[in-house]
Image (cartoon, rainbow, N blue to C red):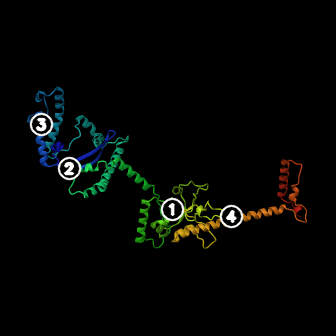
Amino acid sequence: MHQAVVTQFDYGMFVTSKVDDGSGSIVQVVIIEIPTAAREEHASKLCAIANPLLGFLHRQNIVERAFLTDDDCPSWVTATQRTILKTRAKLYYAHLKLIRDTDGRLHPTPPLLLYKHSAQYRYNKAKPGLDMNTEISAYVGCAARCGFEGKYVFRMLDAVMVNTWRAYQAVTDIAPWLATLDSTPSLKQLRNHLYRKGSIRQFVFDTSYESLRLIAIQKTIIRPPFFPPANTQRTLGETFFLEQYTSYCRKNSWPIKRNARERFVEDPFLQKLRLRSFVGFEHKAEPIRDVLSGVTPGPDGRVRRKCVLCFVSGNKVPRESRYSGVGVSCSTTYMCRICMVPLCKFKTTDSEWKCCHAVWHERQNLKLEISRQGKRLLENRERNDNDARKRRQHAVNAYNKRRSPTKDGPQSQLDQDMEPTNQSPTEIDDTIRDENKEEDAPMSLNEFL
């Protein structure tokens, strides 16, 4: 109110600040109106107290003279106080004279931060940054060890965060509370209602955590084709579906890394997602990226994961199968660029058996296709195992047949070589090695003829 009386302003600002570790910053700013009657009442009360003490400074002869002498000061003023008054009075009278000489253009005058000596003022005229730094530093404060520009940026970020916090409180706490009241509450009631409703520190932590969670969502960049088709304009339904897809990825954990098969079966939107395809939104297979999978790449630099469609757990495999209790799965290095799930993309000679990537995006009943793909994978594994077993048995039979003697013929050369001998094991190995070298040596022309 004293500043309003001195400056004759009709409006002012009420500033609330916070102090942490010896440094302060602005929390909120409120614009207030100052009525003329309030200023006059405050000025009358102030003059009743100030005239007996400082009334001698406003005598007409002293103001026109623009300086003080020892005789002008009352007897109760000490020598130290007299020196201070004589020094400050010159600056005060010079300022008052400047206001009067401008025909009221500087009245009301803006409040000054400090008075400077004429020598200091002339010196700083060549260095305007000193005055500006002194003035702005009084309003902007930061405990960080950085330059003025950095502190200013931190202060602006702090102000934005505090305003966001107040707006969040107004929407979530104040608005529902005001709806239940019959009259407008006072400022004290508002403060009591917001007391311990949540600190600015907790709001900053929650906002930062939410921002980091949204940043961590993996987004797919859909590149346009090099030769775009004739009709690349999306319909209203396709645009709305893209917005739904983006909103779903932000609200949920994306990509789905756990129970992906069950989620795509139970969630209606995910069912629609795997079957929906249009220009710029094609379900194409691409290599799995280690950032999305969380799996260490193999020696070839590619990431392998189990296909979500043709995986069969061990308890669903028949007991007579060698995979009972173990399960069977297909390892793949491909995934769908839209669904973000690993799907195998192998080629087969069976025309009725499509790859899991095609089945995933074509068939409506995914539960039935899961059992079919798993059964086909199990049958294929067992058939391959049987073929490998037959090949091994055929090789063993052929080896035994070469070693066994004929009924009428002499003993085989292998059995003759296995007869007891007086040679040591080392000598036997050297003999076998020499014979193998002779057999592998190229045949001469005379021997061939």
Q: Residues within 10 Å of mark 4 (few under 14, many from 20)?
A: few
> Helix or strand or loop: what does disc 4 sit on?
helix
Q: Earlier in the sequence, mark 2 or mark 1?
A: 2
Q: Residue furthest top?
A: 79
User: Along the polypeptide, which appears first: circle 4 or circle 3?
Assistant: 3
Q: Earlier in the sequence, mark 2 or mark 3?
A: 2
Residue 229, position as x, y percentages in the image: 48, 72
Q: Residue at x 54, y 65 (%)?
A: 285
Q: Judge whether residue 103 can be spotted in this image.
A: no
Residue 260's mark?
Answer: 1
Q: Position of residue 385 (x, y in %)?
A: 68, 64
Is residue 182 something one can see in this rendering?
A: yes
Can you tell which mark lies on residue 385? 4
Give the crowd class for mark 2: few <14, some 14-19, many >=20 residues within 10 Å: few
For mark 2, what is the residue? 32
Q: Are marks 4 and 3 in contact (CB under 8 Å)?
A: no
Residue type beneath disc 3: Ile
- The one of 315 and 276 positioned closer to us in this rendering: 315
In the image, which is nearer the foreground, mark 2 or mark 1?
Answer: 1
Position of residue 379 measured from the top left corner of the image (x, y, whole percent)? 64, 67
Q: CA distance from mark 4 to mark 2?
A: 87 Å
Q: Is residue 304 left or right of residue 110?
A: right
What whole-number distance in Å separates the C-alpha atoms at marks 4 and 3?
A: 108 Å
Please state the horizontal and vertical placement of residue 199, each as a whole percent of the image: 33, 48
> Which disc, if any, is residue 49?
3
Q: Residues within 10 Å of mark 3 (few under 14, many from 20)?
A: few
Amino acid carrying label 2: it is Ile
Inter-mark Cα distance, 3 to 1: 81 Å
Which of labels 4 and 3 is toward the front?
4
